[in-house]
Image (cartoon, grey):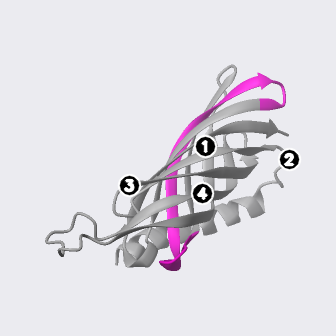
């Protein structure tokens, strides 16, 4: 039921944006971003920390409204097992670390307003996420992200971005609430 409450508005928003794009001109401006990302997830027993990359492509539909495609990859080690679950057998609690790879592909609207050298923005994205944990399997899930950031113009076509997003996934039938922080270079066109 909860997934339907999230998916239905996301699909309606996407259809509305597609209809608006049909009326609007093809985007002639936008930006490309690539940078480092830190991912804090509750996919494992304790919150896990993954590091990776993020790349986005934004096309402007109107001066303050764009549509963004977002790809990310996060890598690291997560802690799985039954550590800390009482009672433990005399041999101790089972626990294992596993190498993990999390990928996300999302899209959605972004609203941004230039203020001097700064451009604060907010965004909402929907898409898919995939996790592969060596030894514990892999899974694909619907994903949503809401967040924002700030671009600081270094010189005309180049800016530096600071961004933070709340990302929700549902790997292995359980919901995860994740924090994604990233920073890197923006090339405006």
| Residue shown at the point (51%, 80%) measured from the top left | 137
Q: Which residue is mark 3?
A: 47
Quarter of the image where the N terminus is located = bottom left
* Structural distance between the alpha carbons of marks 1 and 2: 16 Å
Q: Which residue is mark 1?
A: 111
For the record, the magenta segment spans 129-158
| Residue shown at the point (55%, 74%) measured from the top left | 134
The one nearer the camera, 168 or 84, is 84
Q: Which residue is mark 4?
A: 74
How far across and down, in percent of the image, does residue 178 sit? 44, 55
Circle 4: element type: strand
Q: Earlier in the sequence, mark 3 or mark 2?
A: 2
Q: Residues within 10 Å of mark 1 (few under 14, many from 20)?
A: some
126 versus 24 height, above or below: below
Q: Which residue is mark 2?
A: 28
* Structural distance between the alpha carbons of marks 4 and 1: 26 Å
Callout in the foreground (3, 1): 3
66 versus 140 height, above or below: above
Q: Residue furthest left?
A: 87
Circle 2: element type: loop
């Amino acid at each position: 039921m909860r997934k339907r409450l999230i998916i239905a508005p996301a699909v309606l928003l996407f259809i509305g944006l597609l209809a608006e794009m049909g009326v609007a001109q093809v985007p002639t401006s936008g930006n490309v971003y690539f940078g480092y990302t830190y991912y804090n997830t509750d996919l494992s027993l304790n919150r896990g920390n993954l590091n990776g990359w993020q790349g986005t492509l934004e096309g402007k539909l109107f001066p303050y409204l764009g549509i963004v495609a977002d790809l990310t990859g996060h890598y690291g080690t997560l802690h799985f097992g039954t550590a800390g679950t009482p009672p433990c057998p005399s041999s101790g609690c089972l626990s294992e670390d596993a190498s993990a790879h999390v990928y996300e592909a999302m899209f959605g609207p972004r609203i941004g307003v230039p203020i001097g050298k700064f451009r604060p923005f907010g965004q909402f994205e929907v898409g898919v996420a995939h996790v592969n944990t060596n030894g514990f399997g892999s899974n694909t899930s619907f994903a949503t992200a809401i967040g924002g950031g700030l671009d600081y113009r270094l010189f005309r076509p180049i800016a530096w971005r600071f961004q933070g997003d709340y990302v929700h996934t549902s790997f292995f039938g359980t919901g995860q609430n994740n924090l994604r922080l990233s920073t890197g270079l923006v090339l405006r066109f």
